[in-house]
Image (spheres, rainbow, N blue to C red):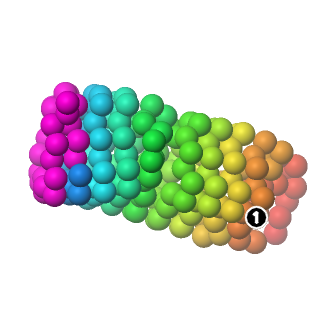
């Protein structure tokens, strides 16, 4: 049975490799914490918030994120594909998510606000009703994703092939439509 922590605040902690494994955190807040050395295994976060935390290249394996908010966090090169799919809900605000992977996840309703998402992997991901608000999606991969009702209207640098990505009722800005036409080698002025 995992250790259970409710309504705790953690600040300025450098977590070691297995320090949080087999633990459940509910309504906890982590501020200025460093998880880069962690190899998460069987950890559950419910209604938790991470502020200014560092997850660069953190290993995540069988972790549950149930209504978790990340604010101003560094989350480079993290593979979320091995997370627990049951009640998976995460939100990102002002985060750096470059080179992270969300391969084949169901991310309906997720919000990304003011995030750097360079070369993020969304292949085969269900992004229905996701909001990318003012995000940099340079080289993000959407192959075989479902992006129905996604709001890309304030984001930039995306390249999406409508032949390989479901985009029904997705919203785009006129100035960034070139990201949908890149394969056709047309010039838009």
Indicate the position of residue 52 as horizontal and vertical percent values. Answer: 26, 56
What residue is drawn where x is 42% and y is 36%?
83
Q: Is residue 118 visible?
A: yes
Kindly give the residue lying farthest to the front in the view shown: 1
Q: Is residue 51 left or right of residue 10?
A: right
Q: Is residue 12 magenta-colored?
A: yes
What residue is drawn where x is 56% and y is 36%?
103
Q: Which residues are magenta?
A: 1-25
Tell me which corner region of the image, top left, top right, bottom left or bottom right, holds residue 60: top left
Mark 1, other Cα within 10 Å: few <14 / some 14–19 / many ≥20: few
Count the numbered circles shown: 1
Q: Is residue 132 left or right of residue 159?
A: left
Q: Nearer the viewer, residue 90 or 59?
A: 90
Indicate the position of residue 111 as horizontal and vertical percent values. Answer: 49, 61
**In the displayed structure, would residue 5 be above or below residue 19?**
below
* Quadrant of the drawing holding the N terminus: top left
Q: Nearer the viewer, residue 160 or 28?
A: 28
What residue is drawn where x is 47% and y is 39%?
85
Q: Is residue 50 magenta-colored?
A: no
| Label 1: element kind | loop
């Amino acid at each position: 049975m995992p250790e259970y922590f409710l309504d705790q605040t953690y600040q300025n902690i450098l977590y070691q490799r297995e320090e949080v494994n087999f633990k459940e955190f509910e309504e906890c807040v982590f501020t200025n914490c460093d998880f880069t050395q962690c190899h998460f295994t069987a950890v559950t976060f419910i209604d938790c918030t991470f502020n200014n935390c560092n997850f660069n290249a953190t290993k995540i394996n069988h972790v549950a994120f149930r209504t978790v908010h990340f604010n101003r966090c560094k989350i480079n090169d993290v593979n979320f594909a091995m997370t627990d799919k049951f009640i998976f809900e995460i939100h990102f605000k002002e985060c750096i998510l470059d080179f992270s992977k969300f391969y084949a996840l169901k991310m309906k309703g997720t919000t990304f606000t003011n995030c750097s998402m360079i070369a993020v992997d969304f292949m085969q991901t269900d992004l229905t009703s996701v909001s990318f608000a003012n995000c940099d999606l340079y080289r993000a991969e959407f192959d075989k994703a479902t992006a129905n009702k996604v709001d890309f209207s304030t984001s930039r640098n995306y390249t999406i092939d409508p032949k390989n990505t479901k985009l029904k009722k997705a919203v785009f800005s006129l100035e960034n439509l070139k990201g949908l036409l890149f394969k056709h080698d047309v010039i838009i002025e």
